[in-house]
Image (spheres, rainbow, N blue to C red):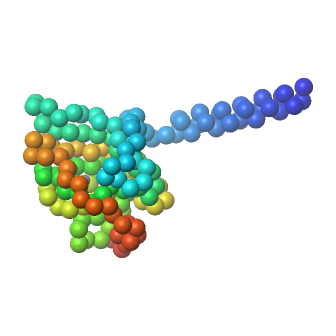
Amino acid sequence: MRKILLSFIVVLFFQLNSWSQQNHSTTIFTKGKQITANFTGVVWVQQLVAKDSIFNLVAGNVTFEAGARSYWHTHNAGQILLVTDGIGYTQEKGKLIRVFHKGEVIICPPNVEHWHGASPGSSMTHISINPNADKGVVTWLRPVTDQEYNGLRSNN
Ligand code: MN
């Protein structure tokens, strides 16, 4: 009897812990599908707005687990990132890594080579918006090396 009661308490503890974690999650949109092409590490993408002739933009929810990042890439028409969770890194070619946090907006100007992803110690989620999608959404280049990912960061 005591063993059954103890087992029940243990199960209840883990269930309450699980519910508590779910309730504290800041995730807004579903994580979507895990993708591997053009990213390093574990990355999830959920398309939110598909390209069409009326709005001419693409929007998606992208979740990077700690250490994950995109390849180097450019956007012909630029990109806006709305950071909804975690701590991330981004870098434009020839500049230092910029650290950013939940609540920040990152502007990626047209045709500037860059990458973005999570920091080593925290996951990061952003909503990506690509305007003027008829000009092209993204051109993928090469992976960000560990040396580049662990490179110098700016102080802001
Ligand atoms: Mn980008």
Q: Residue at x 80, y 32 (%)?
A: 7
Q: Position of residue 110 (x, y in %)?
A: 13, 56
Q: Residue at x 17, y 35 (%)?
A: 51
Q: Position of residue 31 (x, y in %)?
A: 41, 38
Q: Residue at x 64, y 38 (%)?
A: 17
Q: Nearer the viewer, residue 53 or 87?
A: 53
The reply, left or right, for residue 10 in relation to residue 61 is: right
In the image, is residue 88 above or below residue 94?
above
> Residue 130 occupies which quadrant of the picture?
top left
On the question of residue 2 being in view, the answer is yes
The reply, left or right, for residue 66 in relation to residue 62 is: right
Q: Residue at x 61, y 36 (%)?
A: 18
In the image, is residue 55 above or below residue 40?
above
Quadrant (top left, top right, bottom left, bottom right) of the C terminus = bottom left
> Residue 128 occupies which quadrant of the picture?
top left
The reply, left or right, for residue 13 in relation to residue 27 is: right
In the image, is residue 90 above or below residue 36?
below
On the question of residue 155 being in view, the answer is no
**Count of labels in the image:** 0
Quadrant (top left, top right, bottom left, bottom right) of the N terminus = top right
Q: Position of residue 78 (x, y in %)?
A: 16, 52
> Residue 57 occupies which quadrant of the picture?
top left
